[in-house]
Amino acid sequence: MRKVLLALAVCAATFVTACGADTPASTTNAKQTPATTETKQTPAQKAVEKAEQVAKVVKENAPETAAKVEKAADKAAEKTTKAVEKAEKTAKTAKENLAVAEKPADVPPGRDGEVVFKTCVVCHGPKAEKVYLNKVKPPREMAEKEIVQALKDYKAGSRNVYQVGALMSGNAKTLSEGDMYSVAKYIKSL
Ligand code: HEC
């Protein structure tokens, strides 16, 4: 009877232990499996979700973005056109300013340009740089050809750009045509 009880006890103990050992293990496994699957899926799912969100935002903003890109392109094109126009204008001005005035062979040589220019300094400055009466364009900013033409016109009394042409005509009348070419050349050398 004692033996039977002992055997039963051992059996029970074995059973409990076996069960005890088994049960938590299988429980853990059962719990672990989905947990592992979950952690494996989550980043992938998250990435898909994020990609979907990004795609949605891109899709939603596409017309706006396209409009923005178009606007920026238009602006850039406009800027380029303006820059080209400015460069062309600068080139034109530079070319015009370089327009030299060659004295025709039939015009007798005038006095030395430096000598003639001494009579201009009082009004136009030592470098022909003065804005006389706060309005007259400095002669140095004019092309050689333009200066000669202006002097000829003042001498003829037909030029009156700032309504004070008389002041200049008196001076121009003292100049020979040869003087005009030499003084214009001298002004551009200053
Ligand atoms: C008494 C002052 C005076 C003196 C001296 C004088 N100028 Fe002038 N100059 C003027 C005035 C004023 C004008 C502007 C006249 C006008 O309304 O068109 C002018 C205009 C000019 C212009 C044309 C400017 C423009 O924008 O069209 C040139 C070029 C010029 N002078 C060159 C000379 C030279 C070269 C001399 C010397 C030989 C000279 N001037 C002496 C007063 C003077």
Image: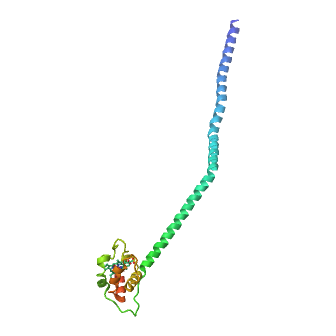
Classify the position of the C terminus by image quarter.
bottom left
Q: Is residue 157 above or below residue 40?
A: below
Residue placed most toward the observer, 40 or 81: 81
What residue is drawn where x is 52% and y is 64%? Answer: 79
Is residue 63 visible in the rendered structure shown here? yes
For residue 15, above or below residue 56: above
The residue under the point 67% across, 12% down is 9
Coloring basis for residues:
rainbow
Q: Residue at x 30, y 84 (%)?
A: 116
Residue 40 place in picture, x, y as percent: 63, 38
Q: Nearer the viewer, residue 168 or 97?
A: 168
Quarter holding residue 52: top right
Q: Is residue 126 visible?
A: no
- Quadrant for the N terminus in the image: top right
Q: Position of residue 170 (x, y in %)?
A: 33, 83
- Identified at 29% across, 77% down, the residue is 122
What is the tally of numbered marks visible in this picture?
0
Across and down, in percent, residue 173 comes to 34, 86
**Ligand 1 appears in which quadrant?**
bottom left
Side of 15 where 107 appears, left or right: left
Residue furthest out toward the bottom: 106
Q: Which picture quadrant has residue 111?
A: bottom left
Q: Position of residue 165 (x, y in %)?
A: 37, 79
* Relative height, residue 122 to residue 36 (above, below): below
Left or right of 140? Residue 17 is: right
